[in-house]
Amino acid sequence: MRRGLRRRPVSRPDRNARAVRAASGPRPHAVDGPSQRSRGREVSLFDGGTATATAPTVSVTSGSSDNAASASPRQAFRRASFWIVFGAIAIVVGIISTIAAGGVTPTDRFGADNAGPTGGRALAEVLRQQGVTVTAAGSADEVTELAADPADTTLMLYDTNAFLTSQSAAELQGVADRIVLVEPTADLLDVFAPDVATAGSPDVGSDASSLAAACSVPAAQRAGSVTVGSMSVQPLDDSDSSQTQFCFPDDSGRYLLAQLTAGSTTVTVLPDSEPFTNEQITRSGNASLALSLLGETDQLIWYLPGLGDLAGGEDVPTVADLTPEWVTPILLLLIVVFVAAAVWRGRRLGPLVIENLPVVVRSRETMEGRARLYQRSSSRGRALDNLRIGTIGRVATMLNLSRTSSVDEVVDATAALLGEPASILRALLRDLEPATDADLVRMSDELLRLERAVRRATSPLGPS
């Protein structure tokens, strides 16, 4: 029963299709290359034929050895270029963030080496030029080591982040005979100037930018006046402040400087560092006051407390210390899973293969779809303009005019050919606007009749 039958091997479509395409050459009416996708449909509003378009078909093939062999290193680099660029940008951003976070510490404000607007480098350099040894210190231990001769040492203390407590500040008493507190905290005032309290902004007029000394402190008298900052000091209530001198008063009993002497130590309180920063040191008598207070001894210790000065000398816990123990194993496990998934899915799916196949699209479908869009948005004028453009172009061709001819040129030539008034033709081809759908249909019929009349008049057989 099966004696006359023979089995034929079933050919693989992908290999045979590739061989047939190679033997038959390029296909007619096919658009090659992905750059021609936008030209896939050619529509004629008045021709009843069809337009040929090419639609790309994407097929996903497995990672066969043929595809792997055909993929060049350049193609592989092109596919991975996005991730390479993304990774490079991420690394650069991380480096910049690390430098920005590590290079600028909270104590850099009013630092002796800070050349920014809020730094104190200008003041420190002038003091060095006058023979004063300016040494920056970042901890209380460094201050103790540097202050070998208290009688010839001035300590400038700026603790804007409140790293020092009353107990740690008390250990600094006696290290220098002259101590200048800049923007002191309440703990520092309790230790060095118990009769002084911080106050708010100075009360000055809108036109005033500085205050006069009005005291007997020699440094304040030499300065004459200083610019107003955002903070001030005042005598502490219910305290005996007879031993404390206050300078640069405002209109409400607040001051920009306080100075007291306890034994051999002279303590000066400056409630605001702003007048002595690089940006404002040259205004008014700011430079004179700062140089007089900080330059009276041969050595100046520029002390900006840091994390090492926290109470008890305890180490600050790091992020790793605060992180629960289970977080690190979970993160490592997630990284392993991500890498395994990437390898698994990456080996399973090969590269995308794009093949252009001919697709026939009826021009009527495109025309009707575009008409529905105009109808839905009530764009009667836009629809009529499209019809007019097509009519003017075809009439210009029949009259041997350029397709870029103006409407008036086409109207004049048509009026001369048909013997119709130019005003009527100009209204039909340009001026009239349809108010209703019925007007649009009527005017489209008029355009069609006009085109037929021109075709009959220009026909070699003559009008029929």
Image (spheres, rainbow, N blue to C red):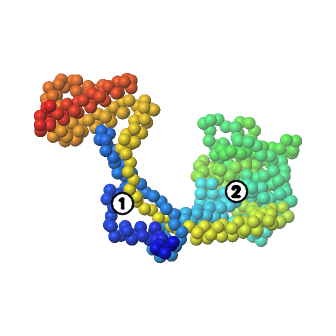
Quadrant (top left/top right/bottom left/bottom right) for the C terminus: top left
Name the foreground residue: 282 vs 265: 282
Residue 184 is at least partly visible in this image? yes
Q: Residue furthest front?
A: 1
Q: Is residue 123 visible?
A: no
Q: Residue at x 77, y 64 (%)?
A: 327
Please determine whether, in this image, residue 329 is positioned above or below residue 217: below
Gap in angstroms between the C-alphas marked 1 and 2: 83 Å
Residue 245: percent from the left, percent from the top? 77, 47
| Residue type of the residue flagged with mark 2 | Leu
Q: Which amino acid, by three-letter code, is at mark 1?
A: Asp
> Residue 32: which numbered mark, if any?
1
Residue at image point 64% right, 35% down? 205
* Labels 1 & 2 near each other (Cβ < 8 A): no
- Viewer-side residue, 111 vs 74: 74
Residue tagged by mark 2? 293
Residue at 18% of width from left, 35% of height from top?
455
